[in-house]
Amino acid sequence: MSVKYRFPEGFWWGSATSAAQIEGAAAEGGKGKTIWDHWYEIEPHRFYDNVGPGTASDFYHRYREDIRLMKEIGHNSFRFSISWARLIPGGRGDVNPAAVRFYNDVIDELLACGIEPFVTLFHFDMPLELQQEGGWESRKVVDAYETYARTAFRLFGDRVKKWFTFNEPIVPVEGGYLYDFHYPNIVDFKRAARVAYHTMLAHARAVRAFRQEGIRGKVGIILNLTPSYPRSSHPADLKASRIADLFFNRSFLDPAVLGEYPRELIDLLREYGQLPEVLEGDGELLKEGKVDLLGINYYQPRRVKAKEHLPNPHAPFMPEWFFDHYEMPGRKMNPYRGWEIYEKGLYDILINLKENYGNIESYVSENGMGVQDEERFLKDGVIQDDYRIQFIRGHLIWLHRAVEEGCNVKGYHLWTFMDNWSWMNAYKNRYGLVSVDLKTQKRTPKKSAGWFRKLAQNNGFD
Ligand code: BGP
């Protein structure tokens, strides 16, 4: 087969998942409650079709079958997260032996199948007890996180060589403290800033612990980077875009890769009285948190324009005081989920990392296409998801170009392996290479799974 777009030897091909979205067994095997279990208990109507995280895709019981299928689909790597509340129920204290057995088995099975495990420590699933103590607003929770991270490194670091402290750390900040889509669904920028800051301190503490433990591998973080594009080159639009970039990308990217926050962001937050409390030693700690490896989750860009009306100074402070969202005419949309599709955004992210972030080693840790009511594409028992193949292909063309231009990017993980439960959206948007029958839990590869297998086997595509 001719391969027009060939990737470098050893490129990582696979998919990404998270514990709360695939494991299920939410109240089994000694697992403690997370904020998601709790939120579902108190406000089930918040979740699409009133479906909670209880069973998810039942990976907890079916991981062997699933890992075999990953192998058949050509995976040489796979990202999953450890559930903090499963490993250490309650968030601090004794380690749960059933969880250690489970994650050991998953890791061993992956390695036996020639699949490199990529492990995330925190993917939105805060143990409930720690949230009740204030979650990331509390420095005591930062202490507990360091202990959890160190425990995981000691238990699994002999076999796991790629570690990520957080997945999309900005999302619990946005969802939980600004825009009402994660528990504890508060709207308060000052508290959001504190949560964001403490998350990065927790990240740095885990990176430091990783190095102290002498784990032979790489430690990083996964960020959802949303390149910010201005409506025009008018200075007011450019400024709006630069500020959106500061809030939504650089607030995490700069401390993670450069070890410090952008001056402009600090000055802006100070001007509006929104800076979190900084303690002695924080600055040095952040410098120790510089990552070896950056995971990039890319779904869609952010298009912005200058504000049309001045913000009401009595309204709660928000990033949107500085820009308006811009619905660019003619932009390509995913008709089945509603997000913009802009493949070149991935290339722009990578070029930015090359030019402004020391060409840090990176990989695409999530990218994918969500589709509602995907059963409508079922034919002869298989979902004919040609749109997903197109989506992946379109992004890979730009990824390939970035590689050719010297970007230090080492792999691509699709979101996701199999249809899974999602935060509030439950099973609304399907992303998998493999469909899951929610009643029987039967797995059936979609058409895209065959395409993905060839892609991985050929290390490229035509
Ligand atoms: C990312 C998260 C994933 C996943 C994905 C799709 O931000 O890291 O956990 O949920 O988004 O989102 P959704 O299922 O809401 O379409």
Image: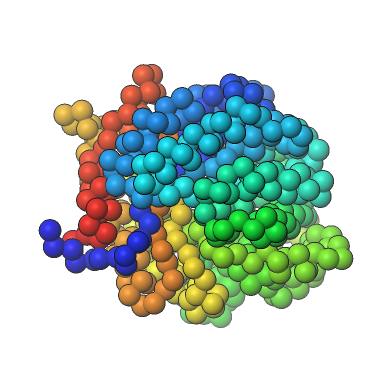
**Residue 301 relative to residue 69: left or right:** right
Q: How many marks?
A: 0
Res. 337 in view:
no
The x, y position of residue 458, in whole percent, is 22, 57
Image x and y of residue 278, in percent: 83, 63
Residue furthest to the left? 1
Task: Name which quarter of the figure residue 300 lies in.
Answer: bottom left
Q: Quadrant of the N terminus?
A: bottom left
Q: Residue at x 28, y 40 (%)?
A: 72
Residue sitting nearer the eye, 440 or 306: 440
Q: Is residue 160 visible?
A: yes
Q: Residue at x 42, y 37 (%)?
A: 109
Q: Between residue 114 and residue 170, name the one nearer to us.
A: 114
Q: Quadrant of the C terminus?
A: bottom left
Expressed as whole percent of the image width and height from the top left, the position of residue 142 reads 76, 49
Q: Where on the picture, by quarter, is residue 257? A: bottom right
For residue 33, above or below residue 282? above
Q: How is the image coloured?
A: rainbow
* Residue at (64, 58) in percent of width and height: 214
Judge from the rendering whether residue 103 lies leftward or rightward of residue 399; answer left or right: right
Q: Residue furthest right?
A: 280
**Percent x, y for residue 340?**
40, 55
Side of 68 relative to 447 (left or right): right
Q: Is residue 295 above or below residue 94?
A: below
Q: Nearer the viewer, residue 21 or 422?
A: 21
Q: Which residue: 42% across, 67% down?
A: 409
Q: Going by the image, does 137 lie left or right of 388?
A: right
